[in-house]
Structure formats: structure tokens, C-alpha cells
Image (tube, rainbow, N blue to C red):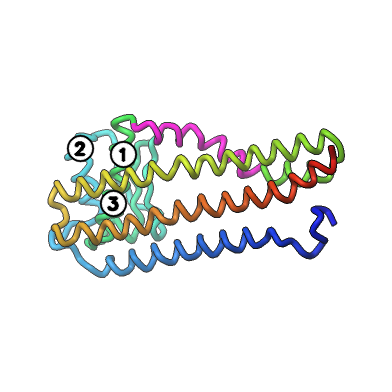
Amino acid sequence: MLYGYGMFYDPTFLFVIIGMVISMGASAYVKSTFHKYDQIKSKNQVTGTQAAEYILQSQRIHNVGVQGIAGDLTDNYNSQTKMLSLSQATAQSISVAAIGVAAHECGHAVQDAVGYAPLKIRASLVPVANIGSSLSIPLILIGALISGSSGAFLVNLGLLAFSMAFLFQIVTLPVEFNASKRALQILSEGGLLTKEEVPMARRVLFAAALTYVAAAVATLLQLVRLIILFGNNNRRNN
């Protein structure tokens, strides 16, 4: 009875299940939404790559490169290398969905160019979040096996490390929503999409943003679960 709930029965595992359901639902929704609007070809017949290059030029961003990468919906912008990477489903497609996704990544490049504060904060949190994700569970488990204040310290350190990963996801939310807002404004003003097509791109980007919300909720649920389980263990050790 390590956690006080019995060796084989842990009611807090419900948090994990809920988090998984939310994440899987968000992932399925973004894939189905992208697929739906990926079937609708833009009237201007521009590819995702051409749209990205046009947007960067129109925003006077000349130090960012555009490249294609393998995978499906693996699009990203790297502020360190100044490289905008578009997945196969985006780079050569002329669909409304592809142009919307390409514009979203350009939105991150614009954030970088103007010094958008949340983007800078997120970049600074990357190493901390990576370390926290890797070390949090081992620290908690080792601490749970050690009695006394040393064990409690390791557990608390592990919980703090896990909290850093959650903080990173919270900071990511305004970054992603703002990038989509910038993208839709550029698409509306730049004429890459028609007035009828812009709302379609908005639905694609909204669906994509939900995956970040789902990830944050799932991580929060896991954090609460860890606090419930090992917080009780801490109190018994002290």
C-alpha cells in the first residue's frame, strides 16, 4: 500500500484516463478538420510554401528560411535557426488548410521579429521544461522510497520539476493563439484567401489550438494526481 490506496487500486488513475481522452479527442478533431479543408483548393492556387514566402516578404522578414520536412502536421518555426519548416501535407498543397497552417507558422516568425514577449518567455523555458519532463518522475519515485526529510525533499523537487513542464504549456497557449490571430489578419488583408475561405482557415487553426489546450489540461490533471499520491506519502514521512 505505497500510496494509501492499495497496491492494485488507484482511483486517481481516473485523472490519467480523462487526460488521455481529452488529448485523443483534440488530436482526432484537428486531423478531421484539417482533412476536411485540405480537400478544398484555394482559388488563388498558391501552395503552402508560396504562401509562407509571400507572407514573410510582405512582413519584411528576410532572415527566415522556408523548408519542407517529413511527416504530417509537423509544421514548426524555430526562432533559434530562423527556419520555418512545413510538412509534406502543407508545403506543396494548394488547399485552404495548408495555407492556413503555413500562415500560422509565419505568425510565429512575425512574433519573433517584433519581440513578442510570451514567445521569448517560452523559448527561455524550453531547457527547464525538458529537464523537468525527464527528471520529475524519477525524482518523485526515488523520494517515495526514501523515508524522512530527504525523501520528502526529492518528492517536492520532482513535483516542482513537473510543474515547470506544465508552466511551459501554459505559456505556449497565448503564443499559439496570437500566432493564429496574426495569420488570419495577414490572410484577410493580403488576399491569399478569399473572404469565403478565411473562415475555413480559422476553423483549422482553432482546431489546432485546441490540441495545446488539451495538452495543458492533461498535464494539469497528471500534476494534481501526483500531488494527491505523493503529497500523502510526504505527510506520512514527516
Instruction: Name the residue located 45 percent from the left edge and 62 percent from the top edge.
Output: 27
The one nearer the camera, 86 or 102, is: 102
Q: CA distance from mark 1 to mark 3?
A: 11 Å
- The quarter of the rendered structure image containing the N terminus is bottom right
Q: Position of residue 175 (x, y in %)?
A: 38, 41
Left or right: 130, with 136 as reference point:
left
Left or right: 180, with 147 as reference point:
left
The image quadrant of residue 16 is bottom right
Magenta highlight range: 116-135
Kindly report the secondary structure that dominates the magenta region of the rendered protein: helix
Instruction: Name the residue located 61 percent from the left edge and 38 percent from the top edge.
Output: 131
The amino acid marked with disc number 3 is Ala
Q: Which residue is mark 1?
A: 109
The amino acid marked with disc number 2 is Gln
**Does the stretch in magenta take in 117?**
yes
Q: Earlier in the sequence, mark 2 or mark 1?
A: 2
Q: Which residue is mark 2?
A: 59
| Image marks 2 and 1: residues in contact by CB distance under 8 Å | yes
- The quarter of the rendered structure image containing the C terminus is top right
Q: CA distance from mark 2 to mark 3?
A: 14 Å
| Image marks 2 and 3: residues in contact by CB distance under 8 Å | no
